[in-house]
Image (cartoon, rainbow, N blue to C red):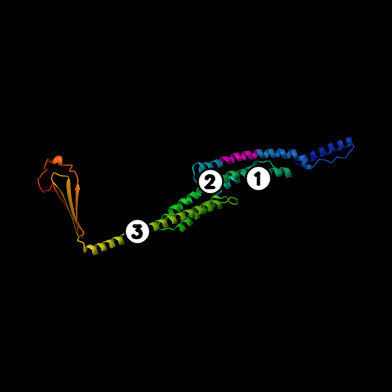
Amino acid sequence: MKTSVALLLTSISTATASWSARSGSAVKPPSFVLAVRGGANEYETKFESVKSDVLEKAFRKIEEVRRKIVDESSTIPDFGAKASSITQSALEEFSRSAPSADDNAAVSAAYARKLEELEANLDAQLEVLYLRQLALLREQALSQYRGASKASDASDYEAMLAADALFLRNAEASTPPNSSWSYEGERTHLQSIMSEFASTTKKLTETQIKSSQQQSTAMQFLQHQQQMIQQLQQQLYGQSSPWNAGVAYRIPDTNFNLQGSYQQGRFNVQMSCVPDEYAPMLGPNGFTNGVGPGNLGLSLNLSI
């Protein structure tokens, strides 16, 4: 490469001197960068071809990871190590397959530029899967928190600490070493969701306790009112009897029904007109012509 560059510079100098002699004027010879520009472009084309081949192989490995995370919604425990391995293998393959720069500044710059483009392409593809993995890890942590918070032997605070520790452990395992990727955004989102859930649960519990207390207060008030009514009844009517009795009598061949009752030391008599639906089935006079089982009903309640 150095001999070719020297011959190229000699040819350029000879052609320049000959042209200057014919024109009779001094001309400044071309610079070294202009002399090797065509060679740098040729190397850049070769570098681009090697980069494309390496990317194609790396994308096949990334597709396997994408299918598991995106299509199956499953997390990869060693995602960080796997992503780092894919990137490192691609960069090493590019270094082996790319032509040598031969200490040429322009060619070395093209080599470094293609190497950076290769790493940036892989980084962009893998970071999308990394963010999707973090979302799945966040849902797993939330599921554990909801389950733990419902247990009677675990407080919301302890459940939040356990869920956050689970997410942190898995997120660190999913982050490649020496990477600029960060899981702090998803972690903050997780903590915000758990805090909101705990606040809602606390408000619901407080509402239920308050409602229970109100119902208990209402029952106590009703019991107190009932006791006052019983005391007033005792003052007005004296000590009430524990006996409750009732009697009913239908006047034969009529629709009149007489009802009498004795409750809490008081008698009550009521007369109603109720058609006898079974009269046609019993005949004109029923089974009897007087007071009997068919005309008399009796009920007895005893409160002790």
* Whether residue 92 is visible: no
Question: Which image quadrant for residue 285?
Answer: top left
Looking at the image, the residue that sits furthest to the right is 24
Query: The N terminus appears in which quarter of the rendering?
Result: top right
- How far is disc 3 from disc 1 in space, using C-alphas? 76 Å
Q: Position of residue 274 (x, y in %)?
A: 19, 45
Q: Where residue 267 appears, x then y in whole percent?
A: 19, 57
Is the residue under label 1 in contact with that under label 3 (CB below 8 Å)?
no
Query: Is there a contact, CB below 8 Å, between mark 1 and mark 2?
Result: no
Numbered disc 3: secondary structure:
helix
**CA separation in Å, label 1 and label 2:** 24 Å
Residue 132, disc = 2
Task: Say left or right for 4 vs 235.
Answer: right
| Label 2, label 3: how far apart the Cα atoms are | 53 Å
Instruction: Decide which of 155, 42 is in the foreground and name it.
Output: 155
Farthest residue, direction left: 289
Q: Earlier in the sequence, mark 3 or mark 1?
A: 1
Q: Residue at (66%, 39%) from the top-left corner?
A: 48
Q: Which residue is mark 3?
A: 218
Which residue is under mark 1? 116
Residue 124 in sight here: yes
Residue sitting at x 69%, y 38%:
45
Residue closest to the eye, 76 or 72:
72
Q: Nearer the viewer, mark 2 or mark 3?
A: 3
Residue 213 percent location from the top left of the image: 37, 59
**Amino acid of disc 1:** Glu
Region of the chain picked out in magenta, as a range: 49-60
Q: Amino acid at mark 3?
A: Ala
Asked if the magenta segment contains residue 170, the reply would be no
Indicate which label's residue lies in the foreground, 1 or 2: 2
Amino acid type at mark 2? Arg
